[in-house]
Every structure is written in structure tokens, then in C-alpha cells.
Amino acid sequence: MTKTILNRIAMARSGDKGEGSNVGIMARSDAAYAFLKEALTEEVVRALGAAFADEVGTAAPIVIGHDMRPSSPALAAAAAEGARARGADVIAIGLCSTDGTYFASGSLDAPAMMFTASHNPAAWNGIKFSRAGARGVSLDTGLAAIRDLAQRYLDDGLPEAAEPGSLRELDVLADYAKHLRSLVDLSSIRPLKVVVDAANGMGGMTVPAVLGDAAGLAALPLEIVPMYFELDGTFPNHEANPLDPKNLVDLQAAVVEHGADLGLAFDGDADRCFVIDERGGAVSPSAVAAIVAEREIRRVQAEGEQDVVVIHNLITSRSVPEAIVAAGATAVRTRVGHSLIKDRMAETGAVFGGEHSAHYYFRDFWGADNGMLAAMHVLATLGVDEEPLSQLAARYTPYSASGEINSTVADVPAAYTRVVEAFAGRGEFDEMDGLTVTAPDGAWWFSVRPSNTEPLLRLNVEAEQEPTMVAIRDEVLALIRA
């Protein structure tokens, strides 16, 4: 099995959202995922650790962290063995969130491996790779080479360096928390009650450190009501996937029950954060992106920066680029995909980048995504005004949106063609990433994107009026599913 396992891995283009496939290596931003349900054995991971060491070299140590899944500690240890066998020194940071690994990679200027399957079920696991400085690894910039070299080590044996690398343990949680506190000052906001659902994921460790005093930092004017903070990678309460509305139900009820100002929901590796308002309503990630964008634009403008750039992908609400431009910055639209946004941020010097999937990227965090930092910006905004979050969010949610709707189809090209033919002449076509059609008067737009790992099409619709959104949504879905 190990002689063919890496060759069986399906290679997906950078940024595809097909994380649900059982087997796949996917590049996502500053991370490459190796999602394997049964095939990610310690032997395979040892080979991948060795191959990663060869790819990044031994000039700097390799940081290795892991989440709370039952299989994660052993896999992280196997990766360390492989890297050390090739002569690389290893810094084991143990339990951490994915953005905790990015912090270590950035602050130590060292490449990193993070063992997590993000929001996926408990039986899964995977690897996120970063180059030194939390820089990305995509298929074209090393991931394919790592795969191929690991396969060779599985086939022919792993050659050991003349002198194995060292291993040391390092706890970065306190420094991580201190760094985030330095980026967003919450010390003088009005008192807020916040319900946090960690879903038994890594947020149960990072929230007390950053928003509380567990890391030895001064207490903030926040009353945290914890939900499911016990680290348990079997996810006994609900999946650690806040993208699915059913996993927000407990948090929404708790926010109302406790009379809280807001709720925060983190995914399994705590790099994404979803926000609930005081009424129990879900705040659109696009609204969060607009709120954070405005804060970051104002901050750097106050420091004298001109020609400020903010990145957003093509399925964020139209309100996001509108907010960016209104704040005096340039909005740069990109295709969907983490590595794509990361690359564009580096190219443009963007201060911030936002995706509708609730990934938020910060120049001051080495261009990496950080859900906790986005949550802190929301707290800072809410904490200087008596306006409730529902009213604040409503200002950034002027349009009616469908959310992303996935349709499995027998013939993706045929379904795509049906949509193209039906809307020819009815709007402006843009094929930057799939097909985006915008009405001539701007009253509606929709995006249809084929998956590169699954036989499905992804639909997003937005319109000025809800009846229009519903009509366009239903028409396009009928074409897709015909």
C-alpha cells in the first residue's frame, strides 16, 4: 500500500474547496493540505517529513505543531523523525492552532508543518506545510516535489544523513497571545459578554490565552462564556465546522440565553472564526471582512501610508469592495483560493485580505490568515460604540445573498454550458474563476465555479432585492441540475 499511496493522491489546483474528498493534496494559502482518511500512516508521514526537510533545507529548524485529534501527536512525532533523519533540526511546539504554527514560522523565520484536518471529521488528518516566514507551499512551489520525493523514500528506503538533526520543545502560546494583543488593543473597550464555542477544537486553548489571562496577560474587559473548551478531537458535541449552520445552533441559543453581546465559533484548528450577533443571527463573513478592512485601512492611513490595498475574492459580497473604496483604499479582486490571496497580498503589499469562507489575512501576521485576530477586530469595533452588533452588521449587509450552494452533477461541462447559454446577452460575463455574470444595471450577480476534485458546481448569488436573488438562484440551480 505504501508503495503506491502517494501516487494515488489526487492533485487539486491551488485554492479548490474540495476538502471533503477522502484522498487529496491541496494547496491552500500558506498551507498545503494532505488530507487522507486511512492512508496517512506514520510511515507515510515519516517519508513526507524527510522530503519536506530536503525541500526546505537544513539552514533553519523545522517547526512541527499539531491539533487535538487522537492521531495527531503520533503523526507529528513521525514527521519529526523523518526530518531529523535527513539532518534537519526540529522545534516541536506541540498542541497549537494553525495560526499558532504560522506565528512560530513567522517569528522564528522557520519552515513549519501543522497536523490537522481543519473542520473535517475526527477520523481524518492532514498536513499544512509552510516555508520560513509562514510563506505558502503550492503544487508549483514545492508540494509536488515533496510528494514525489516522499514516494521515492517509501519505495527505496529513507537514507539517513551522516548526523541526525536535534529535537527541542518550545511553548509559543504566551508569545502568540502577546503578539496578537500588540496588534489589536482591547484594554479600553466597554465591557462585553462573549459566548465562545470552541467545538472541542484548538480554540479551547487559544481563547483563554488571548482573550483571557491564561497566558499571564492582563485581564481584558471581556466576560467569556465558554462552550466546549475541552480539547477532544472526537468532537463529542458537534462537528468543528461552523460553515454548516447546524453546528451554530448551540452557540446561537447560548448567546440569547446569556444576554451576550456576541458569539464566536471556531473551527477545529481555530484559524477561522464565525460571528453571531446578540439576537442569535449569523453575521456574514463578508460583513466581518468589510469591518476589519475599514479598521486596517484607517490604521495604516493614520500612520501615513498611501495607496493602501485590500484583497477580496470574487465571491465576497459586493459590499466588501464598496467599503474598501469608500475608506480610500484600492480593492483588488482575486480568484477563490488561499494561496492565490496570499500571493496577491505579497505582490501588492495589501494590508488585509478577506474571503467569504471566513479566512482573514493580515500583512502584520506575515500575510497569513488568523481567525482570532479577525475576532479581536470585531470586538474592538463593537467595544467603542453602544450600537448592538446586529445593527453594525446590517450596515455591511445591504444585499441579499444565497450563500454557497454545491450541486453534484453527472456532467460538469454540460451543466456549465447550459448556464452560459441561458445567460448569454443578459449580463456581463467574467471568467476569472469559473463564470461570474453581472446584470447590466448591477441589480444582481452570480458565480458558478467547477470543483477540481469533485463532480460538482458551486453557486453564489447576490442581489439588491431578495425576490430577485431567489429568482436568479432558482433559475441557475434548475440549469445546473437539469
Image (cartoon, rainbow, N blue to C red):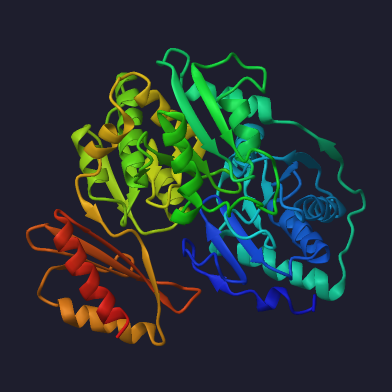
Can see residue 370?
A: no
Looking at the image, which residue is at 35% across and 41% down? 289
- Left-right relation of 25 to 254: right
| Direction left: furthest residue | 441
Q: How many marks?
A: 0
| Direction front: furthest residue | 257
Looking at the image, which residue is at 66% across and 52% down? 236
Q: Quadrant of the C terminus?
A: bottom left
- Left-right relation of 93 to 157: left
**Residue 364 vertical position relative to residue 414 in the rendered view, above or below:** above
Q: Nearer the viewer, residue 441 or 112?
A: 441
- Left-right relation of 414 to 422: right
Can see residue 263?
A: yes
Q: Nearer the viewer, residue 236 or 446?
A: 236
- Left-right relation of 278 to 463: right
Q: Quadrant of the N terminus?
A: bottom right
Looking at the image, which residue is at 20% across and 42% down? 322
Q: Position of residue 293 (x, y in %)?
A: 33, 35
**Residue 145 vertical position relative to residue 98 in the rendered view, above or below:** below
